[in-house]
Structure formats: C-alpha cells, structure tokens
Amino acid sequence: MVVDDEERIRTLITRSLASEGHRVVSANDGISALDRLAAEDVDLVLLDLAMPRCNGLSVLSSLRERQDETPVIVLTGVTDIAARVQALERGAVDVVAKPFSLVELLARTRRHLSATRIPRTDQRFLTAGGIRLDMDRRRANVAGRDVSLTEREFSLLAHLMRRRGDVCRREELLHDVWGLDFDPGTNVVDVCVRRLRNKLKPDPPIETIRRVGYCFHGE
C-alpha cells in the first residue's frame, strides 16, 4: 500500500512496484489508509508523514493500538530528526527521505517484503530459556502461557534467541531487526528490550551488556 497525499508520488511508486510484479493499493490520507488496512491484507505500507486529516505518525500510533503488525516504511520530506525518531519508535521498520532514489526505495521495499516471509526450514519452533516461538504463526509461549508480541518484539526476541550466549551489539540489532544502516541517535533498541522484558516476566533471560548491547542467556 502506498499512502501519500501527492498523486504524482503515488502514481510513480505504484507504477514502479507494479512493474516488479507487486499488486499495489493506495490511499491519499491516513484515515483512508487505516480503513483499507482494517478491511484487507497488506504485506507492506509505504507511508508519508505529512498528510491532511491524519498524518503518518498518527497512523503508526493507530496501528500499534489495534496491534496491526503490518510493516511500514515511512517516506518523509521532514528534515527534523525528531520526527524520524518518533516514526521508528512508533513501529516503522525504515525511514526514507524525500526526495528519494526510486532504485533505493525499491531495494528497501524488496528487503522488507522478504523479511515478512519466513523462510521454510525444518525448525518451525525456536525454543530456549523457557520460551517457545512459533516461527510460522508468529506466536510466543513463555512458561506455558501465551504472550502477545508485536512483530518488532517478536523479531528482536527471535534474533537474540538464535544468538543465545553471544553478545548482540546495538548496531547489529538496528541493522538486522530494524533494517537500519545508521544509528538514529535514540534508544529505540533499549525501549523495545524493556517492553520485551516486561512481557517475559518474572525472569526475562535478556542480559544488558553495558554500553555494548544485549545477550540472551537461556538454555
């Protein structure tokens, strides 16, 4: 889904994605986008920040409130770093600045679409530290109880569990979980880890390695 109040941009991105074989739907404001997302399945959203009626940040907040885990790439002409940080903290998987390179945008789109399709392996379940992740159904069970995780929390936990016993640096997590090749200068990783620990109580097996990153220590 392409969400932008500028018809020229919607048309450009839609045609480019369609030429690569994607089925594309569009919306010209946040309210229309939220209505469509509630009515149909979408694999990825390209979302402008500055729009009438309901801006991109409000869309991200609404998606989080209703636990819609559709990945969102934010497109923004806003140069204020704070707005970009807010977008990431509200659940965006990536931020692309306007004016953007169409080649780069398509590459980022392909990467995030691939990330939403879990590769088939012989190991459907990932188990460690009393936690069991269903990689197909994207569900988590902790000590016999089901725990609701956002897609970002699920991806972060799966990454840490796969690397259990190893120290995962913040730069690695930003790249592999958030899809970022730069440090946004915020504590987005720490905030997500804190939410994870609250959901994995009473004994969350995630250790903080001061000034470095995190380590999953469960067997």
Image (spheres, helix red, strand yellow):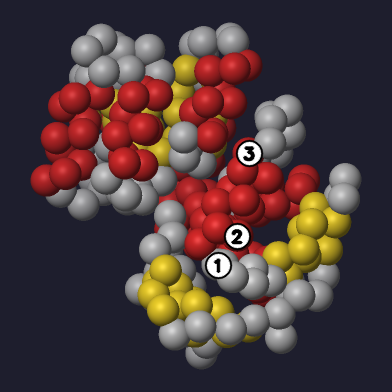
- State the image quarter where residue 3 is shown: top left
Count up the numbered dots: 3
Residue 197 tag number = 2
- How many angstroms separate mark 3 from mark 1 (CA)? 19 Å
- How many angstroms separate mark 2 from mark 3 (CA)? 14 Å
* Label 2 Cα crowd, 10 Å radius (few <14 / some 14-19 / many 20+): some
- How many angstroms separate mark 2 from mark 1 (CA)? 5 Å
Compare marks 3 and 1 and give the one earlier in the sequence: 3
Q: Amino acid at mark 1?
A: Leu
Q: Is 5 above or below relative to 123? A: above
Find out whether the residues at labels 2 and 1 contact each other: C-beta distance under 8 Å: yes
Dot in front, 2 or 3:
2
Q: Which residue is mark 1?
A: 200
Q: Which residue is mark 3?
A: 188
Compare marks 2 and 3 and give the one earlier in the sequence: 3
- State the image quarter where residue 51 is shown: top left
Asked if residue 15 lies left or right of residue 205, the reply is left
Q: Is residue 20 visible?
A: no
Residue at (53, 34) in percent of width and height: 89
Q: Amino acid at mark 3?
A: Val
Quadrant of the frame with the C terminus: bottom right
Residue 170 placement (x, y as % from top left): 76, 48
* Label 3 Cα crowd, 10 Å radius (few <14 / some 14-19 / many 20+): many
* Viewer-side residue, 177 vs 191: 191
Q: Amino acid at mark 2?
A: Arg
Asked if residue 100 lies left or right of residue 161, the reply is left
* Label 1 Cα crowd, 10 Å radius (few <14 / some 14-19 / many 20+): some
Residue 81 placement (x, y as % from top left): 62, 16
